[in-house]
Image (spheres, helix red, strand yellow):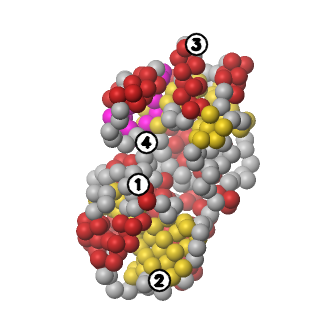
């Protein structure tokens, strides 16, 4: 078996599942920069069994998820790996590690869950080019990421796709179900339910969603906003505190429509999770998952960010019963491709063929 070092920021619950599956194909050691993020609820942390070696670095925490640590250099010096996979390259730890590997001609690969186009300074461009062009190969979540990798020096023939997701095969519904059962279970009293799941921060566009929902004026509808620290109901808008992935399944299955009005998300795993429940999605052109999975209009709609009129119009169109039935089928088909099992198989295959 190939001996692999996988460097990432946090032990997110879906990553634990992914690493356990990948460890069936390779001899895996995972290095985490931090044990948790500063903005995560305590329930977020997974206690699942690990079937691989894991190492937590000690260093200075920076921002919500990053760190600065030189401990990883000792790990690389001490061991011989067939491949070192860097899941991200923006943290001080990742940058220092890649500089070290380039200086010592140690091969590494980049695992890019998403990169959105945007303005960048000359200094940032040169640093990204130094990091990306030096990689032996890249694993990419889709076409938008491919474009950015190539722009910064990656060779097209050295980029390999994988289905980035937090959804297991068991999470994807196999047949349609009665949403009313799940509405009743979570206490939704409306005929139609719109759902948002995520942090209540400006970047996620909650203000845009609430304004667009008010403009819609759709009768017999409730908007559920899940992820804050409060439980509150006001004017058909229901705020629900943080829920674990297991608890969220009821909300995804109760919802008729999922909306992620983000101002910027390099991916947006909640899109995968909603589609696994057969729930159509509306998101923005600044959402990596939306641009990749919904690019043909299958499974939902994509609207410009910060455009309340377009979002309101899309919600009204999507809540039509006939349209929901069509988009539900598309959502399930897409979710069947984007599973953690397929993600592990695809990455393992690339490792076997390249390393």
| Residue at 44% in and 22% down | 130
210 relative to 228 in the view: left or right: left
User: Residue 141 magenta-drawn?
Assistant: yes
Q: Which residue is mark 1?
A: 334
Q: Nearer the viewer, mark 3 or mark 4?
A: 3
The stretch of residues the image draws in magenta is 135-149
The residue carrying pointer 1 sits among few (fewer than 14), some (14 to 19) or many (20 or more) residues within 10 Å by Cα, namely some
Residue at 46% in and 20% down? 134
Residue 341 vs residue 320, the one in the foreground: 320
Q: Which numbered disc, 3 or 1, marks the residue closer to the eye?
A: 3
Q: Secondary structure at mark 3?
A: loop
> In screen coordinates, is 126 left or right of 82?
left
| Mark sitting earlier along the chain (4/1) | 4
Q: Is residue 156 visible?
A: yes
Disc 1 to disc 2, C-alpha distance: 34 Å
Q: Which quadrant of the figure contains the C terminus?
A: top right
- Asked if the residue at tag 1 contacts the one at tag 4, i.e. Cβ–Cβ closer than 8 Å, the answer is no
Name the residue rendered at 43%, 83% in the picture: 236
User: Residue 70 appears at what percent x and percent y?
Assistant: 66, 27
Q: CA distance from mark 3 to mark 1?
A: 42 Å
Residue located beneath label 3 in the image? 104
In this rendering, which labeled residue sits more in front, label 4 or label 2?
A: 2
Circle on res. 234: 2
């Amino acid at each position: 078996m190939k001996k692999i070092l996988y460097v990432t920021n946090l032990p997110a619950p879906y990553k634990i599942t992914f690493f356990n599956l990948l460890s069936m194909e390779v001899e895996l050691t995972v290095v985490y920069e931090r044990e948790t993020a500063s903005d995560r609820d305590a329930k977020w942390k997974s206690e699942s069994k690990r079937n691989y070696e894991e190492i937590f670095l000690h260093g200075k925490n920076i921002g919500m998820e990053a760190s600065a640590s030189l401990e990883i250099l000792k790990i690389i010096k001490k061991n011989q790996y067939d491949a070192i996979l860097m899941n991200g390259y923006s943290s001080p730890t990742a940058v220092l590690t890649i500089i070290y590997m380039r200086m010592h001609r140690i091969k590494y690969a980049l695992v890019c869950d998403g990169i959105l186009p945007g303005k960048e300074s000359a200094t940032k461009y040169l640093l990204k080019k130094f990091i990306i062009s030096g990689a032996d190969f890249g694993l990419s979540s889709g076409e938008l990421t491919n474009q950015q990798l190539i722009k910064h020096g990656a060779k097209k023939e050295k980029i390999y796709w994988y289905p980035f997701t937090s959804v297991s095969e068991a999470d994807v519904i196999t047949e349609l179900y009665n949403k009313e059962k799940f509405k009743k279970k979570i206490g939704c009293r409306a005929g139609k339910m719109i759902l948002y799941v995520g942090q209540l921060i400006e970047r996620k566009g909650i203000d845009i969603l609430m304004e667009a929902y008010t403009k819609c004026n759709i009768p017999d509808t409730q908007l559920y906003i899940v992820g804050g620290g409060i439980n509150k109901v006001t004017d058909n808008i229901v705020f629900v505190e943080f829920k674990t992935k297991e608890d969220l399944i009821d909300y995804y299955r109760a919802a008729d429509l999922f909306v992620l009005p983000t101002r910027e998300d390099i991916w947006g795993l909640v899109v995968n999770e909603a589609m696994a429940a057969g729930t159509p999605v509306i998101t923005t052109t600044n959402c990596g998952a939306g641009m990749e999975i919904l690019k043909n209009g299958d499974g939902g709609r994509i609207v410009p960010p910060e455009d309340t009129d377009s979002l309101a119009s899309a919600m009204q169109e999507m809540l039509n019963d006939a349209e929901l039935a069509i988009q539900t089928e598309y959502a399930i088909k897409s979710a069947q491709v984007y599973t953690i099992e397929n993600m592990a198989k695809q990455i393992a295959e690339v490792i076997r063929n390249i390393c």
